[in-house]
Amino acid sequence: MGWVNRRRDLGSIIFIDLRDRTGVTQVVFNRELNPKAHEKANHLRNEYVIAVIGTVKRRDADTVNKNIPTGEVELMVDEIRLLNESKQPPFLPGETVLPNEEMRLKYRYIDLRREPMQFNIEMRHKVSKAIRDYLSAEGFFEIETPFMTRSTPEGARDYLVPSRVQPGSFYALPQSPQMFKQILMISGFDKYFQIVRCFRDEDLRADRQPEFTQIDLEMSYPQTESVWAVVEGFLTAAFKAAGHEIKTPFPRMSYDEAIQKYGNDKPDLRLPAMIDAREALTPEEWDDLAAKFRMRKEFPLQLIRIPKAGDISGTERRTIGTYGAYQHVQGPSFVQLMTDPKRFAKDYPALSEKVVSFAKIEADDLWLLAGAANRPENAAVMDQSIQHFCEKCGFLRLDLAQKYAAKHKAFEKTGDTAKDFRFLWVSDFPMFEWDKTEKRWNPAHHPFTSLHEEDMAKLEANIDSVNDPKSPLGEIRALAYDVVLNGTELGSGSIRIHRQDIQAKIFQALGMSDEEARARFGFFLEALEYGTPPHGGIALGLDRIVMILAGAESLREVIPFPKTARAVDLMVDAPTPVNEAQLKELGITIRKARE
């Protein structure tokens, strides 16, 4: 039983490729052997649903189809039953040229019949099951948490659900089960997990959806390393379910090191780290070079290398030299010192030899040096921090990698058979980050993240400096960590605050009064007062993991019923207005937007 995938009429013989979830099987209608069934086959069209009864026979050697698992056999039909007809679909599941994405999403039930989509959804199932089996075997309980909860305005915007029985009041759909899973630790369930739906009303992109699925877990009495070991364990099981072996333990790196070497907090380890080329020079050589090119001596001289990029023309190198205004690398916050090795070797032969040897540069590598501009007349440049400079260089590194991806094998599609999975733990993130718009310090992770014990004195000494951009609050390190794969953040977690007095100090440092804290998080703060054990956890994006395993470029390829970039479901045409009676029952009036 299945769909008519393809029909070939050779007169006395009709071949039908019959498709179901497991694949395609060839069925044969022979007019001489069964004229009644052959007559019915004349009326079959693509996507008709049929059932056939007959005898499975081995194909002749010259007709074997090696491209499909059933290619050595065929079904000689004795009886056919037409289960349902089909209109002519807007596109066929077997077509190699796809329609635009809007068409695919509008007719998602047709799109999901395609073999690649069936493969992706099956992989999603296998990965989810492997994770669930692993965590269950490790003693974790799978516990559901509420979808309708209290709005706690932090992070992204909430999706709100109006209450009919409490007019004027709203539930919020959870951005994550954060407080509930911490309460589960207070409740004595020391190992919790959930493969859970979450909701965020935020601007969308290829790796973001308004509703998404995360692998959520929490543990009591953990060290950071014990959380990492659990994650490495279930990721090993998940990737094995998809046919891949990964190496554990994952490498580890501090946030500061990641910024210094890669320019961002989710490094792609498939490319070499940036190197401070000052280490290859004597102090005198660096002084002379910095003076000649007007560079700040206290900033790194970043060497960016793209291996095996091949021959780069002079025109391309001159284009690279203008990357200071390219994408994220904007403004005069750094200067490219060298993009032409021959010119640099001619002008500075000794320095060129030192740099090439120090960085182990090979003949077909693309490389350049970037130093921070020293222009006293430009106050904006002089105010840039070393971190900001490294971030700019990191953007340049990734921009160049993407531009020369076709030449650099490490950046081949992860969907290829030879996959290079480079996992990494990044830890010791800043506890607070400065918000330039609000002119205040905000939590870099969330306000329930614990901090390093040795940084507690710094917190207490600066607890009332929430509006001071130069406050040492920015130097306090959180017990927070991310797991990263090939430049994509898979998940984020932390050791939580389990003492009410420390939680109160964090709220005070954020400029939050006791009354405001109680209004926003009262039920949780009260729970902390009843013998809360130390606990910590993490949440990983299931959709992102499957997207990488499938070699897809968008989450929409691995989510059965996704939304568009405008958060619209084209298949069911949602969201839509509701009638006045429903609004009246909820006590809601719609105000027209200003034109």
Image (cartoon, rainbow, N blue to C red):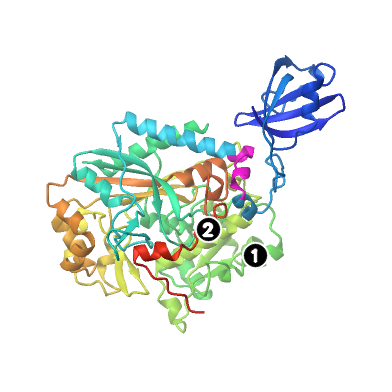
Image-quadrant location for residue 420? top right
Q: Amino acid at mark 2?
A: Val
Crowd band around label 2 with a 10 angstrom C-alpha radius: few (<14), some (14–19), many (20+): some
Residue, x 44% and y 50% (percent of image)? 212
Helix, strand or loop for disc 1: helix
Asked whether 84 or 238 is in front, the reply is: 84
Question: Which x, y percent locates residue 190?
Answer: 23, 38
Say which of 13 and 422 sits in front.
13
Residue 246 seen anywhere in this rendered image of the structure: no
Residue at x 53% of width, y 74% of height:
293
Residue under label 2? 568
Q: N-terminal of the two: label 1 or label 2?
A: 1
Comparing 219 with 366, the one in front is 219
Residue occupying the far right of the picture: 11
**Residue 45 position within the rendered picture, expressed as x and y whole percent measured from the top left:** 75, 36
Farthest residue toward the left? Answer: 530
**What x and y, as percent, mark residue 291?**
49, 75
70 left or right, relative to 380: right
Numbered-mark total: 2
Mark 1, mark 2: which one is toward the viewer? 2
Characterize the local packing of mark 1: few (<14), some (14-19) or many (20 or more) Cα atoms within 10 angstroms.
few
Q: Alpha carbon of mark 1 to alpha carbon of mark 2: how far?
A: 58 Å
Identify residue type, mark 1.
Lys
Q: Which residues are magenta?
A: 107-117
Farthest residue in the bottom direction?
377
Answer with the quarter of the image where residue 192 lies: top left
Q: For numbered disc 2, what is the local secondary structure?
A: loop
Task: From this view, report whether residue 534 is shown above or below residue 589.
Answer: above
The residue identified by callout 1 is 346
